[in-house]
Image (cartoon, rainbow, N blue to C red):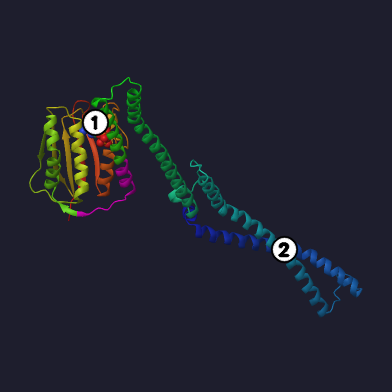
Amino acid sequence: MRNYLNSRLAVRLFFSYLVVILVGMVVLSAAATFAVPGAFNRRMGEMSMMTGRRMGAMGFSRAELFTGFRAIFRDSLTLSIVSASLAAVLVSAVITRQVVAPIREIMKASQRIADGHYKERVRIRPGASGEGGDELAQLSFRFNQMAARLEQTEEFRRQLIADVAHEMRTPLTAIKGSLEGIMDGVLPGDEATCQSIYREAERLQRLVSDLQELSKVEAGAYSLDLKAEAVDSLARAVVSRLERQFEEKGVGIEVDLPDGLPPVLVDEDRMIQVLTNLVGNALQYTPAGGRVTISALQKDRELWLSVRDTGIGIPAEHLPRIFDRFYRIDKSRSRPGGGSGVGLTIARYLVEAHGGRIWAESAGLGEGSVFTFALPVSG
Ligand code: ADP
């Protein structure tokens, strides 16, 4: 019962009004009970003085008695009404304060947040924790959730700026250093120096286009042209794209798909982008002589697509963070390849936009890795 009362603002308000009415009535009747004897004595005294008869003697006319009774009734009623009104106003003020307090608190907190204090939170009344509480408690709870989300976004934004600055610093420092070397005559202005400057500039360009792509997928600023696609043709398209690079590095690539796989409802270009990213990573992190396999299997209403490599593997502690933006296991390790650490983040966004999920598995360093994503089966 108590829980029910606490869980509905309307019920609480209804009972608050009832309490005010009850308090008013109790005070009214108590005040009337106390006021009547005083008013009676006072009126009787006045009537005795006016008529010259002794108080208590039964000598008043019917009209005099009626006038006296009316005056006593009016006096005690006035006093009772004043007392009952005062009591009702007092109780209403206390109840109103209780109801308005959380709203005031939310107002103050929202102002603080608007001023940039993202850590601001409102107090949730004890016993009215979030989901179980009334509408006001839920409002406070949701407000805190919103504030936490804002704080996270702000932190995200700050981190992004710091990450981008950090990522840009290395190639810029290298370009500046080489140019200074040439100007001071320490470095020869020959083809090799120009090529190293060119490589750093290329890296910057790649970073900028990765960031552009990331901001596009993060903001959902693209549309998906969903069609039923055969997994086999997606895999073959990726293999033909990267075949030459596999050959050059001396890494084998194979597609191992069972017969009768159902089609998946995907945007062809976006899916090829995801697969290219995973297969490209597998190539990058697999030494010559290794092997990369694209395989698939159906699990209930999902199709699982995996890219397995026999490469350098991923230590277990890094697996949960591998899809975070700018996350690289060994910062220096992927430097030569120029990876900016956003490829997997983009892949995750794209897979999730298709209603799927993506994860990585590895038995550890030197044991190879498997990247799998699950997509809903079409139809
Ligand atoms: P990058 O552009 O650096 O490759 P990704 O987001 O694609 O960025 O990958 C993030 C990090 O995950 C990489 O820097 C690398 O450390 C690790 N990684 C990704 N794929 C593999 C793989 N197949 N084998 C081992 N490590 C990998």
Query: Image height check: is 39 above or below 215?
Result: below
At label 1, the amino acid type is Gly
Q: Position of residue 91 (x, y in %)?
A: 63, 56
Mark 2, residue position: 82
Mark carried by residue 312:
none
In screen coordinates, is 121 left or right of 162? right
Could you say where residue 128 lies in the image, as x and y percent from the top left? 48, 48
Q: Can residue 182 be seen at all in this image of the molecule?
A: yes
Mark 1 within 8 Å of ligand 1, using the beta carbon: yes
Image quadrant where one finds the C terminus: bottom left
The extreme left residue here reads 259
Tell which quarter ligand 1 is in: top left
Q: What is the quadrant of residue 160 in the picture?
A: top left
Q: Return the residue nearer the eye: 191 or 93.
A: 191
Residue under the image location 86 percent in, 72 percent down: 47
Instruction: Write the start and end of the magenta stretch as one range.
Output: 211-226
Does the segment drawn in magenta span residue 69?
Answer: no
Between 232 and 80, the residue placed more toward the observer is 232
Q: Which quarter of the picture shows residue 281?
A: top left
Left or right: 302 in relation to 76 = left
- 216 is within the stretch colored magenta: yes
Q: Is residue 252 above or below residue 266?
A: above
Which residue is painted at 18% across and 43% down in the image?
304
Q: Which mark is residue 337?
A: 1
Which residue is at 29% across, 37% downward?
205
Q: Is residue 114 left or right of residue 53?
A: left
Closer to the observer: label 2 or label 1?
A: 1
Q: Position of residue 174 (x, y in %)?
A: 33, 27
Whether residue 30 is visible here, answered yes or no, is: no
